[in-house]
């Protein structure tokens, strides 16, 4: 996951982290940074031929982002449900984008869409790796 510059500027980082924690996911990586153009281009490489690519790179490098790594059963599926549809005007109320988003471009948060994408993005944003730890609360989140 990544809270984008618009989410950081709007002061939504704590709210977003809280939603994932309350759902039962475990935070295993967290960092704040202003992405370099090289990292931004690598992250969004799949869109490099699209007309919006230059604007996307300018936006994502315009200020700090908060990168997060989350762990949990079907974490990608769960996270994408919490995030909501890309365009905030189309996102279901109760989702992050449904509650706070009004635009396609300023949609506050990025989430990996598949295990392979997550593996690539974790390597890009967390080359040092993520933490291994267990939460005592998980016994109240998942049935044995």
Image: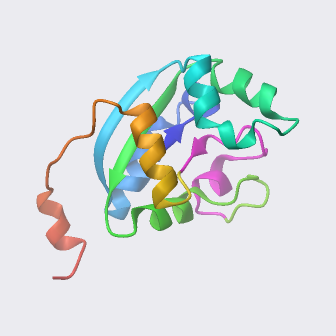
Q: Residue furthest bottom?
A: 144
Q: Position of residue 110 (x, y in %)?
A: 58, 45
Q: How many marks?
A: 0
Q: Position of residue 87 (x, y in %)?
A: 76, 53
Q: Is 45 a magenta residue? A: no
Seen in the picture, residue 27 relative to 4 is either above or below; the reply is below
Q: Residue furthest right?
A: 51
Q: Main secondary structure of the magenta part?
A: loop
Residue at point 52%, 52% (across, down): 117
Q: Is 136 in front, or is 76?
A: 76
Q: Is 103 a magenta residue? A: yes
Q: Position of residue 40 (x, y in %)?
A: 60, 27
Q: Is residue 24 left or right of residue 113?
A: left
* Residue 62 is at least partly visible in this image: yes
Q: Is residue 134 left or right of residue 4?
A: left
The C terminus sits in image quarter: bottom left
Residue at point 14%, 49% (across, down): 133
Q: Position of residue 115 (x, y in %)?
A: 45, 59
Q: Is 131 in front, or is 64?
A: 131
Seen in the picture, residue 67 relative to 113 is either above or below; the reply is above
Seen in the picture, residue 4 relative to 75 is either above or below; the reply is above
- The colour scheme used to paint the residues is rainbow
Residue at point 40%, 54% (across, down): 20
* Residue 5 is at least partly visible in this image: no
Give the magenta-colored segment's residue range.
93-111
Residue at point 40%, 62% (across, down): 75
Q: Quadrant of residue 51?
A: top right
């Amino acid at each position: 996951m990544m809270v984008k510059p618009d989410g950081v500027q709007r002061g939504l980082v704590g709210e977003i982290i809280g939603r994932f924690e309350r759902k039962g996911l475990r935070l295993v990586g967290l960092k704040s940074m202003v992405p370099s153009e090289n990292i931004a281009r690598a992250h969004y490489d799949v869109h490099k031929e699209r007309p919006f690519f230059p604007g996307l790179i300018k936006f994502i490098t315009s200020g700090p982002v908060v990168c997060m790594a989350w762990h949990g059963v079907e974490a990608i599926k769960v996270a994408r449900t919490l995030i909501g549809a890309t365009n905030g005007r189309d996102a279901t109320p109760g989702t992050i984008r449904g509650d706070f988003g009004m635009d396609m471009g300023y949609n506050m948060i990025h989430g990996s869409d598949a295990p392979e994408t997550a593996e690539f993005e974790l390597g890009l944003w967390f080359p040092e790796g993520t933490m291994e730890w267990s939460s005592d609360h998980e016994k109240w989140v998942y049935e044995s």
